[in-house]
Image: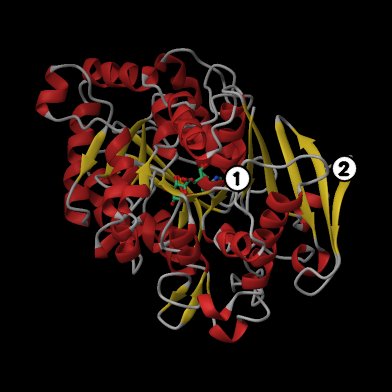
């Protein structure tokens, strides 16, 4: 058994704002099947504490960044959790990263430094009788872990996965002391970034191995455009950077068993779900494809490009059903588009069950992202026979086979990719999508290809396991 401690700020089904939670909820189980024993360290947010049931206190910490804390072990679904019960950091109203108005919590540096500190403490002294051989942190919230491992003089390998380089977890240098960081290491080769403390940089500098969530994103990260200031350190650490594409939880995302939908084995079973979805969104019948989009509404996701290109879809008789929440200006613009056109319907909010119904009922799933480390909704789309129309970037480039003449001729296409990532090129892609949709035999073939593509975790979990095996001591 390889003992691995996951350190992560969200985990499905307990708490989720995006794909990070999906990965944290599914990968440990896939690794379990390969002989890993994964325990997941999570912050004890109010929403989590209320949902845990029976827990066992395995450690206590007296002064953890401003208050006492307990480490609670429990099992939820197939996951072994270590929940950091620190009310002064996590027991509050609002979101997990910010208040109800969307402002980051001012003490986020301490909140996630505490998580990282406890990860290092577990690597040092264990959690109860359990001690990890590998610590595997995800995104900046786990980023300071190698600094604390160093401070505690713990020699346990640290693997770091970049899910999204856009979030750096920066804090003012005045916080060196409260964050218990060594001022002598506040340098460019450790965690100093343009005069600030960067949790992300600490991880990139200190990890034994860096992974990211697709091979294309691993290459893109080395460029100034995608590396967002971290491309230099990533180039320096390039030999230790590897891309491993995400999978999906096939227990949760499976059209044959999904409790949220009218289940189906082949794409013909989608028809009933399409009718139901149109009803849910108040859409009438139409000749063109019913496109769906489920997303956080941020600059990254290219929803503004979609708004510009939308006439190209609507003029061809297509429809759009969108579920999302985020930037207020995008929410307003989308709601306006829905009012202006009977074939556009928008629901602002977060709704897990509806997201499944959209995968089942849509003809095509849109992912027009400016950058996308991996992206999960196109993978759900493939599994449900809902063909992806995606930007050619990151994981979207790696997981969709574009319906080029050659791919169509050899019968392997699964979707449509557009490049450059502009409204104009998205408009052309809508034209291509509508052309394909108007050829039922071609469309059905693509759906069959999509539904048989391997999108689970099996192959990628093996790659993580190989990394753990390379890093842990070789005496067993
Ligand atoms: P990211 O992590 O950048 O948000 P991903 O595509 O990796 O992008 O993952 C997004 C996850 O969040 C998917 O599981 C998607 O279904 C889910 N999601 C995003 N927005 C919503 C929403 N408004 N309602 C329900 N699920 C959502
Ligand atoms: C990030 C990325 C997304 C990826 C997810 C899970 O949030 O934006 O592309 O799929 O993490 O790795």
Q: Residue furthest bottom?
A: 174
Residue at numbered disc 2? 55
Compared to residue 321, the image places residue 181 above or below, namely below
Structure colour scheme? secondary structure
Q: Where is residue 85 in the image (x, y as percent from the top left)?
A: 81, 57
Report the front residue among 33 and 418. 33
Question: Does 331 sit left or right of 181 as displayed?
Answer: left
Report the front residue among 467 and 449. 467
Mark identifier at residue 351: 1
* Rendered residue at 48%/54% (across/down): 207
Q: Position of residue 234 (x, y in %)?
A: 34, 59
Q: Are marks 1 and 2 in contact (CB under 8 Å)?
A: no
Q: Does the residue tagged 1 have its C-beta within 8 Å of any atom of ligand 1?
A: yes
Compared to residue 211, the image places residue 62 above or below, namely below
Compared to residue 325, the image places residue 41 above or below, namely above
Question: Does 408 sit left or right of 113 as displayed?
Answer: left
Compared to residue 364, the image places residue 56 above or below, namely below
Mark identifier at residue 68: none
* Rendered residue at 42%/36% (across/down): 284
Sequence-wise, the earlier of marks 1 and 2 is 2
Q: Can you tell which quarter of the image residue 362 is in? A: top left
Element marked by disc 2: loop
* Rendered residue at 51%/15% (across/down): 264
Question: Does 85 sit left or right of 20 as displayed?
Answer: right
């Amino acid at each position: 058994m390889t003992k691995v401690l996951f350190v992560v700020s969200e985990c499905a089904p307990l708490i989720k704002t995006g794909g990070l939670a999906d990965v944290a909820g599914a990968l440990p189980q896939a690794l379990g099947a390969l002989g890993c024993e994964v325990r997941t360290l999570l912050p004890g947010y109010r929403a989590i504490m209320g949902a845990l049931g029976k827990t066992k206190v395995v450690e206590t910490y007296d002064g953890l960044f401003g208050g006492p804390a307990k480490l609670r072990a429990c099992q939820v679904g197939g996951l072994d959790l270590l929940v950091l019960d620190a009310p002064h950091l996590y027991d509050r109203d609002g979101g997990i990263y910010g208040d109800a108005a969307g402002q980051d919590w001012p003490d986020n540096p301490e909140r996630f430094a505490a998580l990282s500190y406890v990860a290092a403490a577990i690597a040092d002294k264990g959690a109860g009788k359990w001690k990890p051989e590998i610590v595997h942190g995800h995104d900046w919230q786990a980023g300071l872990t190698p600094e604390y491992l160093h401070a505690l003089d713990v020699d346990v390998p640290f693997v770091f996965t970049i899910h999204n380089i856009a979030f750096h977890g920066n804090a003012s240098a005045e916080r060196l002391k409260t964050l218990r960081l060594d001022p002598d290491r506040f340098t460019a080769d450790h965690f100093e970034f343009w005069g600030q403390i960067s949790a992300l940089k600490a991880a990139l500098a200190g990890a034994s191995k860096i992974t990211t969530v697709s091979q294309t994103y691993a290459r893109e990260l080395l460029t100034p455009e995608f590396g967002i200031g971290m491309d230099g350190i990533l180039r320096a650490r390039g030999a230790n950077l590897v891309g491993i594409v995400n999978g999906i939880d096939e227990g949760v995302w499976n059209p044959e068993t999904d409790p949220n939908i009218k289940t189906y084995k082949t794409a013909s079973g989608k028809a009933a779900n399409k009718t139901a979805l149109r009803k849910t969104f108040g859409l009438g019948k139409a000749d063109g494809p019913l496109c769906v989009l489920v997303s956080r509404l941020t600059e990254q996701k290219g929803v503004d490009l979609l708004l510009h290109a939308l006439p190209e879809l609507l003029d061809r008789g297509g429809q759009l059903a969108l579920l999302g929440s985020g930037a207020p200006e995008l929410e307003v613009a989308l709601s306006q588009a829905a009012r202006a056109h009977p074939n556009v319907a928008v629901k602002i909010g977060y709704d897990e069950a509806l997201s499944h119904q959209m995968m089942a009922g849509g003809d095509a799933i849109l992912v027009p992202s400016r950058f996308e480390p991996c992206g999960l909704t196109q993978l759900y789309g493939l599994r449900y026979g809902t063909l992806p129309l995606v930007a050619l970037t990151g994981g979207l480039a790696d997981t969709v086979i574009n319906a080029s003449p050659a791919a169509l001729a050899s019968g392997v296409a699964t979707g449509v990719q557009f490049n450059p990532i502009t409204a104009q090129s998205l408009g052309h892609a809508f034209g291509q999508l509508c052309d394909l949709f108007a050829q039922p035999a071609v469309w059905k073939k693509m759906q069959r290809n999509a539904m048989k593509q391997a999108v689970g975790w099996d192959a990628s979990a093996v790659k993580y396991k190989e990394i753990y095996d390379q890093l842990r001591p070789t005496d067993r």
